[in-house]
């Protein structure tokens, strides 16, 4: 290897100030980058393991017929999953579905209208309004839950649907911002072409904007769904009727029982996570497909 | 229906004169207002009204139960005076600062390291490790809190793996553990944002620096860091804001305890309002949080809208 060193130092480079740089021999560079690669991959693997450790209990306890807080090799059974997919626990999951769907629907419909307006129309105070939207997308609106509780209690709204409306507001600003960015990228020629054919605003939205900005709208809707699905404090405070409580509250109630069934808790937690993971997997594909937007305009 | 096209060729300039409208400016259309109404209405009713109401509530004697839950009224600065001498509030403020500060450092460092390692990693590791970190991020707070509790309590996963099963880390270092749990659950987000920003750094810049024999530390400090600055600042601010909202995690793991060791502001506000019956005082503590969030929020807007 040392013998052919001379033949390898052939690549030189003359810089503008006249100094001549000798580029390092190719194989030396690769061997040091191999070392780097191995170190990098090892470090990455170690970090991955560290991130995996806290999940182990959830995975093992869910298939253990005799689970506790302690980590142990499971007595394999799927009974936990059977146990949690019945009765009031199933109702709670269903409540979560209603809560998340209603809130996503409201936020996405209101959001797409507003996003289109902000993207294409002349609006008085547009700049300040957009700054306000951006600002409220950063501020966690769920910390406003006390005044909202007092208002809802006064009108007798401590039920599932008003709660869904409040949850939609907590994700609305970010959804508007996300969708506006995607609508901005839809070529204006397409909209003008539709206008020539005397399409009205709703036709333009429905036939042109929504189909072309769909990846962004879907991403925004998924954000809203996940936000509502996982929310714990808002339904805990704003829903007074136990039979309307969503899954996170059921899970918490589970824990406070005198003799918690840990296997069931873990299984229920996993079932509760499934929609979130599925939606995330679906949306990462959507994002990849989303950037072929320019193809809509010919010539 | 009015037309949006600025220089509509079908209507001549005489029409513009007739209507006394300027053709070089797009007019505000009624349909725009109509389209904005649902979103702005919702934000006004469920964001601005509660916000204003909370400011007022903080200065009243409203309670959750009892006579003052119905017949309540303005109580002047009583709550503010109480807040000033409330040692639990001030210690909660420090706990919050530790929790948020620790989360920012952990999330940004881990997020950056993971993002840059993933760029050069083998496909297998990229999918598996990236997947694990993202799953941790996607996991709802209740579930994350539960599995972290099981991992850090006595006989839990971590103490068993370390060979000292009886030690209860959650009791010994509660604030550190809940901060780590929060870092664990937010790193995935940071990793994805950092990854996207890293891919946008032009390769030529790095190559040019390599040609100039810049060390990897110099490349990081002089090229990567300046280009990543806006992203890093945005992630820092978002981590701060999201940590403030992520208190369900702590609620599940410790409920603010043991004692007041993990009682961050959102929890203290909740506790005052719904456990100790003081809705008004809870709202006032909530207002302090809104104030803190506003500072971060304004900084975030200034970065994001640049």
Image (cartoon, coloured by chain):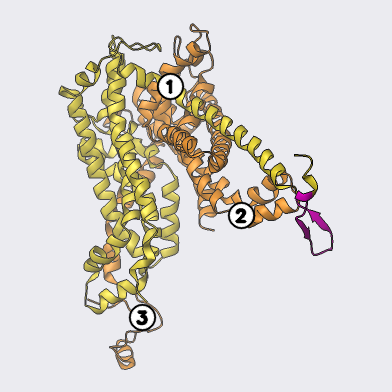
On residue B203, which mark appears? 2
Quick check: can you spot residue A289? Answer: yes
Position of residue A150 relative to residue A208, above or below, is above
Residue located at (57% from left, 51% from top): B230
Q: Secondary structure at mark 3?
A: loop
> Closer to the camera, B97 or A90?
A90
Which residue has dot 3 on it?
Answer: B6
Furthest-left residue in view? A87
The crowd level at tag 3 (other Cα within 10 Å; few <14, some 14-19, many 20+) is: few
Residue B147 in picture, x, y percent from top left: 39, 21
Q: CA–CA distance between discs 2 and 3?
A: 42 Å
Query: What chain letter is assigned to the residue under label 2?
Result: B
Q: Is residue A262 magenta?
A: no
Which residue has dot 1 on it?
Answer: B148
Residue B262 in picture, x, y percent from top left: 49, 22
Furthest-right residue in view? A18
Q: What colour is chain A?
A: yellow
Query: What chain letter is assigned to the residue under label 3?
Result: B
């Amino acid at each position: 290897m040392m013998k052919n060193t001379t033949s390898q130092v052939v690549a030189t480079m003359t810089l503008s100030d006249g100094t001549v740089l000798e580029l390092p021999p190719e194989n030396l560079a690769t061997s040091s980058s191999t070392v780097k690669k191995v170190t990098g991959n090892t470090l990455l693997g170690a970090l991955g393991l560290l991130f995996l450790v806290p999940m182990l209990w959830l995975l093992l306890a869910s298939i253990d017929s005799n689970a506790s807080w302690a980590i142990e090799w499971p007595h394999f059974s799927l009974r936990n999953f059977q146990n949690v997919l019945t009765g009031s626990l199933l109702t709670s999951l269903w409540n979560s579905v209603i809560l998340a769907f209603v809130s996503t629907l409201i936020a996405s419909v209101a959001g797409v209208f507003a996003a289109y307006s902000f993207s294409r129309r002349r609006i008085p105070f547009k700049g300040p309004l957009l700054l306000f939207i951006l600002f409220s997308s950063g501020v966690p609106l769920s910390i406003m839950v006390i005044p909202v509780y007092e208002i809802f209690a006064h009108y007798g709204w401590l039920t599932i649907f008003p709660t869904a409306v409040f949850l939609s507001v907590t994700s609305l600003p970010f959804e508007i911002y996300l969708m506006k960015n995607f609508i901005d990228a839809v070529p204006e020629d397409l909209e003008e072409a539709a206008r020539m054919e005397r399409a009205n605003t709703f036709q333009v939205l429905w036939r042109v904007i929504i189909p072309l900005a769909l990846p962004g709208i879907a991403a925004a809707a998924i954000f809203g769904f996940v936000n509502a699905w996982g929310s714990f404090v808002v339904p805990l405070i704003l829903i007074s009727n136990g039979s309307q409580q969503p899954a996170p509250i059921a899970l918490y109630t589970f824990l406070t029982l005198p003799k918690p069934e840990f296997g069931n808790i873990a299984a229920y937690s996993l079932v509760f996570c499934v929609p979130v993971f599925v939606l995330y997997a679906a949306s990462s594909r959507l994002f990849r497909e989303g950037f072929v937007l320019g193809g809509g305009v010919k010539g | 229906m009015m037309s949006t096209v600025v220089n509509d060729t079908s209507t001549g300039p005489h029409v513009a004169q007739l209507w006394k409208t300027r053709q070089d400016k797009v007019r505000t259309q009624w349909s725009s207002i109509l389209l904005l109404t649902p979103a702005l209405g919702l934000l006004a009713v469920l964001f601005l009204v509660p916000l204003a109401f909370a400011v007022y509530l903080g200065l009243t004697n409203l309670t959750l139960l009892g006579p003052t839950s119905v017949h309540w009224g303005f109580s002047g600065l009583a709550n503010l005076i109480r807040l000033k001498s409330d040692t639990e509030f001030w210690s909660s403020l420090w706990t919050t600062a530790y929790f948020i500060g620790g989360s920012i450092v952990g999330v940004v460092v881990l997020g950056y390291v993971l993002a840059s390692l993933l760029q050069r990693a083998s496909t297998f590791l990229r999918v598996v490790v990236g997947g694990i970190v993202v799953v941790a991020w996607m996991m709802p707070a209740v579930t994350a809190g539960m599995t972290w509790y099981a991992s850090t309590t006595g006989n839990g996963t971590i103490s068993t793996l370390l060979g000292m099963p009886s030690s209860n880390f959650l009791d010994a270092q509660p604030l550190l553990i809940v901060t780590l749990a929060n870092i664990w659950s937010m790193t995935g987000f940071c990793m994805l944002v950092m990854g996207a920003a890293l891919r946008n750094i032009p390769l030529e810049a790095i190559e040019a620096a390599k040609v100039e024999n810049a060390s990897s530390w110099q490349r990081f400090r002089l090229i990567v860091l300046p280009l990543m600055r806006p992203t890093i600042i945005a992630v820092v601010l978002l981590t701060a804001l999201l940590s403030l909202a992520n208190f369900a995690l702590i609620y599940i793991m410790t409920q603010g305890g043991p004692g007041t060791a993990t009682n961050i502001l959102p929890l203290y506000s909740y506790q005052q309002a719904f456990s100790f019956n003081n809705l008004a005082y809870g709202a006032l503590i909530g207002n302090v949080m809104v104030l803190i969030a506003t500072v971060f929020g304004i900084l975030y807007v200034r970065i994001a809208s640049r």
